[in-house]
């Protein structure tokens, strides 16, 4: 299993200063930058589109990790790939042909991930696990940053790890010093963190805490 990667979610960062955020994340040792794309349909909230990623891209050395929380992911894949996305993850609960979306992402030369909400069983994504590079197990209901970790999701992380010993397994929502240990023990190796990193006095130390 690859070692732990930290993906910094910009959702709860200072959105008026994404350039500064990109620099701080680079300096913190977090390897990935996580973009939460919400369309006001799949989830209530609306965040940002591919033009925001394109604007941040030149100011960051991080791996660009895009999390699509949208009803029609196929409309966004090419736009985000062209903007500089290196991983695009979409939800199994969205309205799409999952295999076609995975193939389209791969055809654009980037990595593909599939996401499950806390209440969606692993069985739903099982047919697609071999085709993807990453499985994202949501550890909160998608929609907002700053929510509490749902402990029931730990079993699901273990289930996915058993099915895919060498893939990226990402967790997203409520990750802090305590929950990071639980998800890593369960088999997760990509930890998305928003609030914990952006509220920390020292982001580099906070990244260290998530990995220790
Ligand atoms: C929730 C988002 C998460 C969120 C994580 O829908 O997908 O990426 O930003 O934020 P924290 O770490 O604050 O729970
Ligand atoms: Zn996310």
Image (cartoon, rainbow, N blue to C red):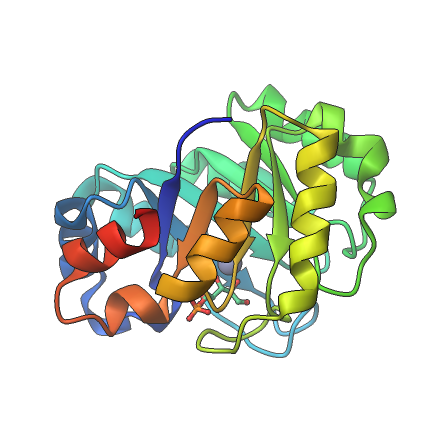
- In the rendered image, the vertical position of residue 117 relative to residue 86, given as above or below: below
Q: Residue at x 28, y 71 (%)?
A: 15
State whether residue 35 appears in this view.
no
Return the residue nearer the eye: 110 or 77: 110
Q: How many circles with numbers are drawn on the protein? A: 0
Image-based side of 206 in relation to 179, left or right = left
Position of residue 134 measured from the top left corner of the image (x, y, whole percent): 59, 35
Residue 76 x/y as whole percent: 59, 47
**In front: 77, or 67?**
67
Q: Is 201 placed above or below 116 here?
A: below
| Image side of residue 101 versus residue 3, left or right | right
Residue at 75% of width from left, 31% of height from top? 163
Q: Is residue 63 visible?
A: yes
Q: Nearer the viewer, residue 24 or 4?
A: 4
Relative to 16, say whether 155 is above or below: above
Q: Position of residue 117 (x, y in %)?
A: 71, 61
What's the residue at 65%, 56% (across, down)? 154
With respect to residue 16, does 190 lie above or below? above
On screen, residue 148 versus residue 7, left or right, reads: right
Instruction: Return the x and y of residue 64 as percentages of the image width and height.
Output: 38, 41
Q: Quadrant of residue 57?
A: top left
């Amino acid at each position: 299993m690859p070692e732990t990667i930290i993906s910094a979610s910009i959702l709860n960062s200072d959105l008026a200063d994404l350039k500064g955020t990109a620099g701080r994340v680079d300096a913190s040792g977090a390897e990935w930058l996580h973009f939460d794309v919400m369309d006001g349909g799949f989830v209530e909230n609306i965040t940002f589109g591919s033009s925001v990623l394109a604007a941040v891209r030149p100011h960051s050395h991080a791996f660009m990790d895009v999390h699509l929380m949208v009803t029609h992911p196929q409309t966004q894949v090419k736009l985000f790939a062209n903007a500089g996305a290196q991983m695009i993850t979409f939800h199994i609960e969205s309205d799409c042909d999952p295999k076609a979306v995975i193939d389209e992402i791969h055809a654009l030369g980037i990595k593909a991930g599939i996401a499950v909400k806390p209440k969606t069983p692993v069985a739903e994504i099982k047919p697609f696990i071999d085709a993807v590079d990453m499985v994202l197990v949501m550890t909160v209901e998608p929609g907002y940053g700053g929510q509490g970790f749902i402990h029931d999701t730990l079993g699901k992380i273990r289930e996915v790890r058993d099915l895919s010993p060498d893939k990226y397994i990402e967790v997203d929502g409520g990750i802090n010093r305590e929950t990071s240990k639980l998800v890593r023990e369960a088999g997760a190796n990509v930890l998305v963190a928003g609030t914990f990193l952006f509220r920390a006095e020292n982001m580099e130390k906070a990244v260290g805490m998530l990995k220790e």
